[in-house]
Image (cartoon, grey):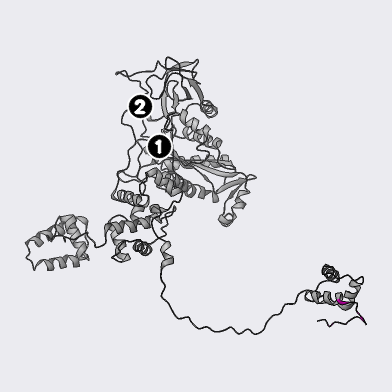
Amino acid sequence: MATTPDTTRSYLVQLATRLDAAGHGGKGALLAEARALYGWSNTKLYAELERQAGWTSGRKTRADKGCSRQSAESLEFVAALERGSVRANGKQTMMMPLAASIAATNGHAISVSARQLNRLTRARRLGVAQQSDARAPTKLRSLHPNHVHQVDPSLCLVYYMRGEQRIIRDDEFYKNKLEKLAKVQFKCWRYVLWDHASGLVIPWYVAAAGESPANLYRFLMFAWGQQPARRFHGVPKILMWDKGSANTATAVQNLLTALEVKSITHAPGNARAKGGVENANNLVETQFESRLRFDPVHSVEELNTAAAAWAEAYNANALPHQDTRIRRDGMPATARYDLWMRIKQDELRLLPPEEVCQSFMEGKKVTRKVGRDLTIGYAHPRAKASRKYDVAGLAGICAGDVLEISPLVFGNCAISLRVPRYDGEDVHYRLEPLEEERDAYGRPMSAPVIGEAYASRPMTDADRAGQALDSLLYPGMTPEQMDKARRSNAALMGGTVDAVRHLSQIEIPAALPRRGTDIAVSGQTLFEAVPLSHFEAAKALRARGVDRPDLHPWLVATYPNGVPDADLDDIASRLKAGPQTGAPRLAAVG
């Protein structure tokens, strides 16, 4: 029978009415008819009746539902043991049978099987799998195009040597032969920018030995600046990337500060925080670089020209016989450029001339002393003369303080002011000269708008359960202390858990020794010592007190094949006893 969601719901509503009208004995036949019609189990049928028709059987829930003879304290202890065994890479090294055994050894009454313990921990969101799900990434949103950009550099599969395009092959540069790749001095690096709101992709290539602040600067100038035949441009408000050395370099950070771009770096090993640009890198590799095997280019300049043409077509959904529109829940499939073109005038922040940006890359932060009138004098790079900035009323600033100043690009000769605090958390202020514009209420236009702040993700049951388990693993510790204890591999639960010590106290049942069979050795190998040379033997005999002028000739005549080391003591005794008579003694050798 062909069914649709509408027909199924209509049938279930009618079935619910018939079930209410049927007597006690007639409901079974109706339920059997529905099960046969859809191939559902009894549980599935009851669930769909409740979900789509709002009908329930009316049976009372068991009074003991959710209860267990296993104590909650012991269950949390077992779950904490499992949680504490999870390594940094997410691998769980202690499973339930072992955790239950350790818990029983430490005085916890384990009254159910390991399988039932697993069921109970899953139901209470205490299991390792549920805790892992609780750490799943939260979906983020940006407010408009150019609000958030993500940037990520990657080693490209293509490189150039002596004017020839070459492609890294898996059989030539696999993980155990990376030293061969290291011999390629100037590899080709791919920088990719991804706009969070529109999904727009901008690739750029450079031949270099590795990542550097200079190459990163060149890419940002290319991506944010206006380029011929490219619609996309503009400076974002937030830049997300990893903690690479080039990204966190002082010169780059100075530029971002001057452009009023907030830099957000994710923690090491958490690349999914910028998963959009990770996917964009894969997209460039599979959709553009795969073409180069069939239609090579011969320099990085040609590569950038081809990449720019491909990106324009891809973002505009203009590639022949390809649908490159972006698809998201709640909106129709749309070309990336169509989404980016929704940007408004106040959201499109134009990149200043490159010579201005270069001055901020090379510029240094300066210090200025606060005057008695609570003002600071500073000559902004774009100002013709020194200007005064009012710091009166700013928390943490007093007359005579020496403060660090950085010039900002946007605004009327605005500066960034860093004020150190006693607790180590610096405060940053954005200031403009005293003649700055004010609104109708007498407030500075540069003042931050109230309410523009971050919001944390609401806590789930798994989060709260995880906090309870952490309090068992690290009793009496703050979250910061817990993190420190994790990094130092401190003993969990204060070292009170007997997970190993009891092993030596386990009584193993006695058993009769097993009889064995001797190994019959077919032959015995005898090793003979190498005899001493006549010189070595004479030296050893003199050390034993033998004083005979013809000792060496006597040894040569008596032991022509060398002197056995074991005979030295006997030879010394005979020679000390007196002179030898008769012909030299012939000794059998071999």
Q: Earlier in the sequence, mark 2 or mark 1?
A: 1
Based on the picture, tell me whether residue 289 belongs to the magenta stretch. no
Residue 335 visible somewhere in the drawing: yes
Please tell me whether residue 10 is drawn above or below residue 260 in the rendered image.
below
Q: Secondary structure at mark 2?
A: loop
Residue placed under numbered mark 1 in the picture = 148
Residue 579 painted magenta: yes
Asked if residue 4 lies left or right of residue 176, the reply is left
- Please identify the quarter of the rendering in which residue 424 is found: top left
Where 355 falls versus 213 (above or below)? above
> Residue at 38% across / 24% down in the picture?
395
Picture coordinates of residue 519, whole percent (x, y): 59, 83
Q: CA distance from mark 2 to mark 1?
A: 19 Å
* Residue tagged 2: 448
- State the extent of the magenta-drawn residues as a range: 577-590
The amino acid type found where label 1 is placed reads Val
Give the class, few, some or many, for how many residues have Cα within 10 Å of label 2's Cα (few <14, many ≥20).
few
Q: Amino acid at mark 2?
A: Pro
Question: Which residue is drawn at the image coordinates 37% and 18% (left, top)?
Answer: 437
Q: Is residue 294 visible?
A: no
Pick the residue in front: 573 or 563: 573
Q: In the image, 22: left or right of 403?
A: left
- In this orientation, which residue lies closer to the viewer: 72 or 466? 72
Q: Position of residue 316 (x, y in %)?
A: 41, 40
Secondary structure at numbered mark 1: strand
User: Taken as a whole, is the magenta stretch helix, strand or loop?
Assistant: loop
Is disc 2 in contact with disc 1, using a CB cutoff of under 8 Å?
no
Task: From the image, state whether disc 2 or disc 1 is nearer to you.
Answer: 2
Location of residue 99 (image quadrant): bottom left
Q: Nearer the viewer, residue 468 or 493?
A: 493
